[in-house]
Amino acid sequence: MTFALRIALLLLIAAVLAAVAAWRLNVTYDLAYFLPEPTTAAQRILIERLGQGPGAQIVYVVLPEATAIEADAAGQRLRELRGVRRVYPQVEELDLETIPAVAWRHRFLLADLPEDEAAWQEILAARLVDAGLADTEAALDLIAADPLLASLDALSSFATAAPNYEYEDERYLLVQTTVPAFDVGGQTTLVEDLRATLGDTGFAHARLYGIGVYGADLQAAVRREATVFSALASIALAALLYWRFRSAAVVVAIGAPMLAGAAAGLCSLALIYNQVHGIVLAFGFTLLGVVVDYPLHLFSHRSGRSAVWRTLRIGVGSTLAAYGAFLLGGSAGIEQLGLFAIVGIGVASLGTAWLVPGLASKPSSAPPVAGTPLRHWPWVAVLLLAAPFVLVRAPFSDNLAALTPLPKATLAADAELRRRMGSSDMAHVIIVRGADLEAALVGTERVAEHLDVAVEAADLVGYTSIAPLLPSQARQRQRQQALRQFAATGATQGERSAFAEASAAMAFSPTAFRPFHDAVLAAAATPNWLTYEDLAAAPELAPLATAHLLETGDAWVSLVFLQGLGTNVDLITARIATLEGVELVDLKDASRALMATFRERLLTVLGAASMVIGVMLLLLTRSPRRTVWLLGTIVAAVAVSTSFGAWLRDGLSLFDIVALALVAGLGLDYGLFYSRAASQSLEAADTRRAVFICALSSTMVFGILAFSTTPALHGIGATVAVGVAAAYVLARLGCYSNPAS
Amino acid sequence: MPRFGVAVIASVALIGTWPCKADQEGQHRVAALEFPVAERVQFVELQMNRLLRKPAEQRGTVWIEADGALVMRIEEPLVEERRLHRGQLSLRRLARGNVSTDLDAALEEAPPRTTTLDVRRSTHLALAALADLLRGDVESLSERFDIGAVLSGGNDQDDWTIELVPTNARLRRALGRVHLHAKGIHLVGFDVEHNSKKWRRMRFLETASNAAAGDMP
């Protein structure tokens, strides 16, 4: 088979694998993929609820230089869009049509009936004032049928409206959507519609914020940047290779194994996982950059390719061992990354072996040029210089926000907007655990009683829990019993009825509440309990139910979200201290602990992999001195890159740790080739040139990636570019030039 | 339709929009109204709707803040504050059982419900008109209402009444009658009457101290 045919066949296989991957691949941007298995209840909540809290389906719209009338007109147009549930601020309507049927049907189970005439008078006074501000007949109908406004009150406790909708010359709209935050496709469509509609209403410069917007924008940005940087890197790499080999066929042949490896990696992910994280794809391709070195080394050597291949095999084996550690990394995202890299590198190395002829030939009979003498002082000196930088300042950032691919400016703008609108930061949550749903609901009701006192004492601005919308069965039975008694006393019209007395005192007509009266009698006669399933089946209420309640295998957890907690964490903790199964969780602390645990685990696994690689190197090279030199050179290069990241980029994230593994893999290759004993001086010269081109191409490609505006990609690019350059210089300085060359 | 007929209809319509002397008199009187902007003025309001057997009374205080916001605080039968500022309406209601005597502080702590002021709704339009009147913003009032003729009161010192007609056609039908009452240059109150079973009458007690709720026209 000719060389050209082999290349064509390899590319064809890559195309088939890529087609299979494209057919099956589902991409997600859920950050939880990069978080480990939780070990505490707080961590479990953090991971399972990430991006799914009450604010996850909110889009904040900032209208610069807008008047109230213009903002209202824009809000009106946005309300007509598919996927928009509500736009705040909105005119409050006392209208039955705004109440979900299930909440209306069970309204008498959602509120306590007033106990005496004074309490009824207070309720009816409120309705009197409500009627004064509601001018539709539907509002009066609603008051007549439910003077308690039980269902409306239960729903309004979840209202996402913020206190402020203007700041200086900006006006804000708060769009509540029906699209789940994790549905990136749906969010993308909705965000496009929102932007187009705002453009039509004269707000082409409106700014959008929110989890869904970030997901949609992030997908577009990652796709755009991946395309741009891949194209730039590919062009630069192709130009460099063409400059080196002066042959388009060789350039294609060097790229073909990488394409085959990437396609195989994608295919494996698509076949094994239902969803693959976008960062795995972006990052995975960069990790695979190492495989370009394989054919590059081989084509750079005019002789002794079988010996080069043997050296490469050591590099491939070590790299696979390092990336194999990712399979034990403890998070789906890291596992996916490991699988992609292992399959990709494996297929690319096999493709290289198949593509380049003459690898199976026996080693040259010529005696090797004198074994390359190695110097240890460069890596020792660099390690000693870098160590203080690494040790003085903790090199790793345990901030969960560091994992987010969002630009810091966006995060800062988001925080500022929430501050201006007076929205809660949702940094704290109360977890109520129960053996079953009923226990969790009873616990939530007890917490609510304590928090009501806290709100009254101004220790807290407010809170949301599922309690108003889904009372425990025990409370529902109490209310049903009270309803029966109310009906037995004649409901709204009996002689002994406190309601009738209060109604008369408040100037209401005796027949005004006839619809309420009839509904009470019907509900008292036939109990109709409200269940979690009822809420889950109602499209309007299901998001609220799932945001506040979750089943964790052997238990149910109810979440209570706090607003305006400020510095009163200890006060609230003290208030709920006596409640069993109740815990106030600081989500930031939980995330830091989670990230620290994850980092320790990943470093431990990578450390173990390094030891395995060390033993492998010792066995394969049969030279303790060379093995120490190789490991020392790699460690020094990693230390340089680590200190660079720690001091210039506010600490290294988990992605940077993975990037350091790539630095180690590439550094090992350079070291292996520089330290190997070539059989001829010509071969030694070829080796030096090949390593130089490999290092130059890697530094160039990752240097380009460092210009990405996506923090994760920028971090990876900078870490690898610095590390690879350091590894090359250290390897080059660490071995004496062979005089024969 | 014959061209002549179209011309007649158009002429009649135009005549209807031509400002007559009476309209100008109304504009002049409204423009001359004074309201003690810096003070809190007590009011009493009667409302009637089909759920009530007799008019229900609400009492409270109203004032204009330094930033131009209208604050209407109902104190009986319960405490609710409506704050209208830059097209947004914020409502704060004291929680049941709150017996605080310092209403300013208690209301400040109550969580607000903010809604857009929707002048397509008659109740919101009435609030906006009240804000315009108390601020003396005749231009804004004229955008919402055509200021009609003086219905009673011969000279500037008498009690006089004027009709406000919403510029919005739908509201014109929904609102029925809107009457503004004054005594000389002092605003006394205004009425919104949808029909005989649905109306609201508001009186400012400091400028009409003898106008107890029962004495309302």
Image (cartoon, coloured by chain):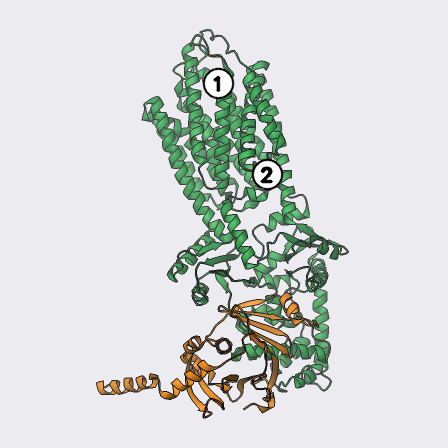
Q: Give the chain of mark 2.
A: A
Q: How many residues crowd around disc 1 within 10 Å: few (fewer than 14), some, or many (20 or more)? A: many
Q: Amino acid at mark 1?
A: Arg
Farthest left residue in view: B3
Output the letter for the chain in green.
A
Is B170 positioned to the left or the right of A112 in the image? left
Quarter holding the N terminus of chain A is top left
| Secondary structure type for disc 1 | helix
Q: Is residue A56 above or below residue A248?
A: below
Q: Colour of chain B?
A: orange
Q: Can residue A525 be seen by looking at this rendering?
A: no
Contact check, label 1 and label 2, Cβ < 8 Å:
no
Residue that numbered label 1 is attached to? A732
Q: Where, by quadrant of the figure, is residue A365 drawn?
A: top left
Frontmost residue, A159 versus A202: A202
**Residue B25: image x %, image y %?**
40, 86
